[in-house]
Amino acid sequence: MSKELDLRFTRARALAELSKLDDAFKAFEEIIRTKEWRGEKTAASLYWLGLLHERNAGQMAAGKPSLITKPKPSTDAALLPKEMAGTSPTSGAAPLTVKFSAVAPAGGKVSYLWDFGDKGATSTEAAPSHAYAAAGEFTATLTVKVDGKEESKTTVTINALANNEPEDAKDGYKKSIAYYRRCYMTWKKYEVWAAKSYFGEAKILATKLDQKDAAKRLLQEMLEKDRIKDTREGVEAKAYQLGL
C-alpha cells in the first residue's frame, strides 16, 4: 500500500507539472479519499490541490483559459448491465441528473423498484430520472419482480463529480485558499506542508485579493506555531511579513 501511494503521488505531481490539471486533480483527490492512505500524503495532496488552483488562477488572470474544466457527462456502455441498457449519463459534474432505464423481462406482470443510493426517494417507474445533488460515488439498485416474485437485482455505479472549474481568476484564488486552509487546519502536525499552505494563502491574500491586513494576521498566526516557524517557509514568512 505504501509503495502504491508513493507511485500515485509521484504520478499526480508529474501530471501537475505537465499542466494536465484535470488529471492531476483526480489523482490527488483519490489519495485524499482513500482512508488507508490518511497521513502526510493527504496533507501534501491538499497543498498541491491549492497550488494547482493558484497556478490556474494566474493563467486566467493573464487572459488565458482555465486548465481546470467542468467534468463532461459520459456513459461507459460496456459497464452498464443489460437490465439497465439506456441509462445515461453514469458520470458527470454534480449536480448530476441521470435518466435511468429498465429493460422489461418477457411475460407476466412486471414491477420495478429503484434505490438510487443517495438515501433519497425511491421510484417504481420503468424509466425514472434522478438528480444527485452532491458529489460522490453512488450505487443505484434496480429490483425487478415478475408476478410478485423477484426476477433480478442489478446495480450500477454513478459518479457525481466535483466541479472544480473556477468562474474567473478571483474565484480560482479563493478555491486555492480553501485547499490551503484544509491542509494547515487539519494536518498541522505535518509542519512542512502546513507551512507551505500558510505561506501560500498569505501571499494570495496580500498580492491577489488585496487583503494585506488579513495576510499579516495569518502570518502572525503561522509564526506563533513552534514547529512551523522554523521551517524554510517560516523563515521566508518572517522576511515577507516585514515588507507588508
Image: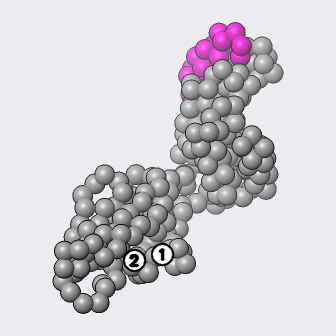
In the foreground, 201 or 79: 79
Quadrant of image for the C terminus: top right
Instruction: Say what secondary structure mark 1 lies in.
Output: loop
User: Measured along the vertical axis of the image, is residue 93 above or below residue 186?
Assistant: below
In the foreground, 148 or 41: 148
Q: Name the residue under label 2.
A: 84
Number of callouts = 2
Q: Which residue lies furthest to the bottom in this view?
A: 107
- For the point 24% across and 58% down, the residue is 121
- Horizontally, residue 169 falls left or right of residue 85, namely right
In this picture, which residue range is highlighted in magenta? 206-228
Kind of residue at badge 1? Leu
Q: Do the residues labelled 2 and 1 touch (CB within 8 Å)?
A: yes
Provide residue 169's location: percent of width, then percent of height. Answer: 59, 48
Where residue 80 is drawn, which disc sits there?
Answer: 1
Provide residue 110's location: percent of width, then percent of height. Answer: 22, 81
Can you see residue 195?
no
- For the point 70% across and 9% down, the residue is 226
Magenta-colored stretch includes residue 224: yes
User: Measured along the vertical axis of the image, is residue 226 above or below residue 125?
Assistant: above
- Horizontally, residue 236 falls left or right of residue 42, namely right
- Horizontally, residue 128 falls left or right of residue 210, namely left
User: Measured along the vertical axis of the image, is residue 61 above or below residue 147?
Assistant: above
Can you see residue 166?
yes
